Image (cartoon, helix red, strand yellow):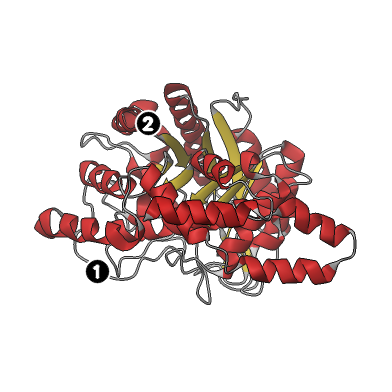
Amino acid sequence: MVNKNYELAKEQYAAIGVDTDKAIDALEKIKISIHCWQGDDVSGFENDSELSGGIQATGNYPGKAKNANQLRQDLSKALSLIPGKHKVNLHAIYAETEGEKVDRNELLPNHFENWVAWAKENGLGLDFNPTYFSHPLSDDGFTLSSADEEKRKFWIEHGIACRNISEYFGKELGIPSAMNIWIPDGYKDIPVDRYSPRERLADSLDKILERKIDKKYHIDAVESKLFGIGSESYVVGSHEFYMGYAIKNKTALTLDSGHFHPTEVISAKISSVMLFVENLVLHVSRPVRWDSDHVVIFDDELQAIAQELARGGFIDRTSIGLDFFDASINRVAAWVIGVRNTQKALLAALLEPTKMLKKAELDGDLTTRLAMLEELKSYPFGAVWDYFCEKNNVPVREKWLDEVFRYEKDVLLKR
């Protein structure tokens, strides 16, 4: 039935000039960066700090991963239900130090050897993030922009250590590691001096990024935020700050779906950003009223993000990663739902007759543009998606859920 439905869909799309086989081949090449922190509620393996920096995971669903082996086991189960080969995104707090106390400015590549071995075994890439939250030296709300020079030095050293680890990932796996810098720095109430913290942040970033690293191994990225819990009135690393820094210093720019005003969407920013930066990193999330990091669903914004990437020809310049953490539902299911929805959105965008639509727009035929965009919504893209899943030997439609609940019964509930 899957093959029969696909052949019918293939004919329908061909009638409007869309090659479904070509769209499937393009989707197969896209690696989604799957965030490890969904599996353990951003706890990490340091075990001595509460979540801070505006980070909050809600819920207490059973089966949370409590160590690296459990986390990798859960990721492997999720990956077995997701079509294609992807990447896994790590934070510095997921280092394995074998019980030794290693502070974040002393982290080394060998603390991530098990992750690299696992990635090699599974044909995956790895991305990386310094962890500038949930640490005693971030308790006052400041890290790279701190006026305390000793604290700022510590966090600069952490950033340098993390770049070395990210480069190691790229060299070992043959897939570039995108390393994203996000800090929670800011004030709860209105500051007097907005300039000095940003001046210190720019200086800190310059020091961290001083050593040049080949982009075939490592990509530097910087991420902004509008506000956070405890930094409602002022965030040092604003969009304007990082947009300027990325352009000036030729780093990638990270856009997070939840890091802007509720009336702003990152899909509207992509075309502007891509005029001025070489690479884009996306943290695809679902904000509900604030940066609440809900599981990604197949909503209008997710589809709009995918459309912007496909229509602009930006996919090859973009690292698409997910960033949510929901502890109220099965954590493995959350990964599968989020990644499969992101892939569905990309497939729908790749099945669009973009040349036809652009020509109609350029010719001033806005009637055809609107009519075709609406008609496409009922085209059988679901049949193409089912075929893509079957082709990649993963469950079609909701059949994957049976696997998740079997895994929950056999593994998660026994922890």
Q: Does any portion of residue 339 appear in the rendered image? A: no
180 lies left or right of 358: left
Q: Quadrant of the N terminus?
A: bottom left
Q: Does any portion of residue 214 appear in the rendered image? A: yes
Task: Find residue 96 and name its label.
Answer: none
- In primary-sequence order, the first of circles 2 and 1 is 1
Characterize the local packing of mark 1: few (<14), some (14-19) or many (20 or more) Cα atoms within 10 angstroms: few
The residues tagged by marks 2 and 1 sit, at their Cα atoms, a distance apart of 32 Å
Q: Position of residue 263 (x, y in %)?
A: 66, 74
Going by the numbered disc 2, the residue's amino acid type is: Gly
Vertical side of 67 occupied by 126: above or below? above
Disc 1 on helix, strand or loop? loop
Q: What residue appears at the point 65 percent right and 56 percent down from the top-left corner?
A: 352
Residue at the extreme right of the image, as rendered = 363
Which image quarter: residue 349?
bottom right
Q: Nearer the viewer, mark 2 or mark 1?
A: 2
Q: What residue appears at the point 47 percent right and 60 percent down from the top-left corner?
A: 382
Q: What residue appears at the point 28 percent right and 59 percent down from the top-left corner?
A: 399
Which image quarter: residue 86?
top left
Task: Find residue 60 and name its label.
Answer: 1
Q: Position of residue 301 (x, y in %)?
A: 59, 66
Which image quarter: residue 22?
top right
Q: What residue appears at the point 38 percent right and 42 percent down from the top-left corner?
A: 392
Residue beneath disc 2: 123
Going by the numbered disc 1, the residue's amino acid type is: Asn
